[in-house]
Image: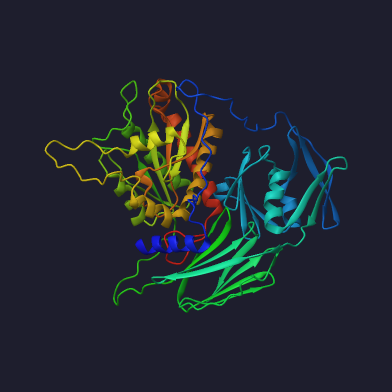
Amino acid sequence: MRRRLALLLALLVTCGLLAAQRLVPQAPPAEPPPGEGEPTREPAPTPAPPTGPLVSTPATISVAGRDVAGSVLIAPSGPLFSLPPLAPLLGGELRQGPGGAGWVLRTGDVETVLGTGSAIATVGRSIVQLPQPVVGGDAGPWVPLELLRRSFGEALHWEIAWDAANRRLVATAQERRVVSVEWSLVHMQGLTTLVLQCPEAPRINIAERGQRVEVTMLGDQVAQPARPPEVVDPLVQALRFADDKILLDVAPGAVVEHYQQQDPYRLVFDVYQRVAAAPGTPTPAAPQRPTIVIDPGHGGVETGAIGPAGTQEKELTLLLAQGLARELAQRLPVDVELTRDEDAELPLDTRAAIANQHRAKLFISIHLNSSVGTGATGAETYFLSLEASDARAAAAARAENAMPPAAPGAAAEAQPASSVAGLDLILWDLAQSQHLSESQRFASLVQEELNTALGLRNRGVKQAPFRVLMGAAMPAVLVELGFLSNPDEEKRLLTVEYRKQLVDALVRAVSRYQAQGRPEAPDAQAAIR
């Protein structure tokens, strides 16, 4: 871990970036609900599905100067286009998601995940808010123009425009850009890091072919760098810039991991040699199905929040986690593990360690919220950050991080001062920053499904230093599924039907996340992409 920190600091100095930059952009604070002692504003309206039947009308689809007959739905918020016939014309491939949930559109190496009735889609690793929801049809989904531009436009370089007067959808090839690239290379303690910096995010595809890594500019051209690459490094043998490619040759047996950072855009490669196992050491078999670890919050003497009727948070989180585990195992091709399956006390650090032991692909910690008043309602989803996104998120983290009272006569466990904001978390945040972007993406899907399916008040996706999420070597979120301090929500949470609705929303979020998938580095818990 010290090696990783030293390398990152050296890299920041090399790039002139020692100004404190967050590796994951802070999510904007959600508006606090009324009645909780904070100012309120009118929330932004959420696009609603069109009311009444929509009738398709003839339209012309023009792709690279070739006209074909098509159709369009004219909705109040704009036109909707049938995706199944458009996808092959523009070079894409459309299929249904796992278990028939939603749709997956592949454009080059980018996958777009969308669902009927939802105004949220994921394009690559980005969450996209659409101007109106996707509409289902017998032959497949109808999508707004914005989705066509974000998927086919960004991945396959089409300029897409709608001529409303002539009912004509026009797709033309984008002009080729010349992308300038600055490079820097650092080797320290067995790890080489190469940074490629561009003035704006390029359209790229990355492929590993033996000892070579090819970065291909999709529709663009690479400008020769002002400083020619002269590489003298034990792990990186050559670096070349040629037309639309950047070629990286590495030493035999070297492992290459890569990830991207923004503001400014940087493509970062970490190159290292895998340490060989001692002779006779058995190699564990890789799991055939991804594992998801679900953590029921609290347990044992740590009751968590207590509702007006005396309901304890630890009891409901266990019921919700058990229900989620059953549904995931039945409906998706995954293995599921619980951090606890009974009313037992479990240290916060142990919960993430269990997920790491199982080499989990997702870690979901389930909790219920509490407020001083009884009027607070809604769901919140968190992912890890050194700094809380707002005061309420900071307070929630302090409450969840609080240690349970020691048993009579037991020696208190020594805790370093300010352990949550101490060096351990700083190291984790730097070394595991690639997981935070995935956690943010999954958290957004969870929040959107809860809001859409249950009509819950959108309290937003937030960041906070939750100790239970620290050290999890995979995307990890903590979801507060309601306010136990609200007597109405307490009553709903005690019903099997309402808990089933919450579980179903979480299953849909996992399905959408899984449908897109995320590539992995060889023998690494999580790829840096």
Camera-side residue of 28 and 400: 28
Residue at (36% x, 55% y) in the render: 356
| Left or right: 83 as drawn, with respect to 110 | right
Where residue 357 sits, quadrant-wise, is: bottom left
Residue 523 visible in the picture: yes
- Residue 508 visible here: no
Residue projecting furthest to the right: 166
Name the residue at 63% across, 62% down: 204
Q: Position of residue 139 (x, y in %)?
A: 71, 46
Q: Horizontal placement of 316 versus 521: left or right? A: left
Image coordinates for residue 309, horizontal then vertical, percent: 33, 21
Query: Which residue shows up at 72% across the image and 59% down it?
Result: 91
The image position of residue 337, as x and y in percent, is 36, 49
Is residue 498 shown left or right of residue 207? Answer: left
Extreme residue in the left direction = 409
* Residue 391 rendering spot, x and y as whole percentages: 43, 33
- Relative to 135, is 190 above or below? below
**In the depicted view, which residue is nearer to us: 366 or 53?**
366
The image quarter in which residue 481 lies: top left
Where on the picture, by quarter, is residue 180? bottom right
Q: Which colour scheme is used?
A: rainbow
Q: In which quarter of the image is the N terminus?
A: bottom left
Total numbered circles? 0
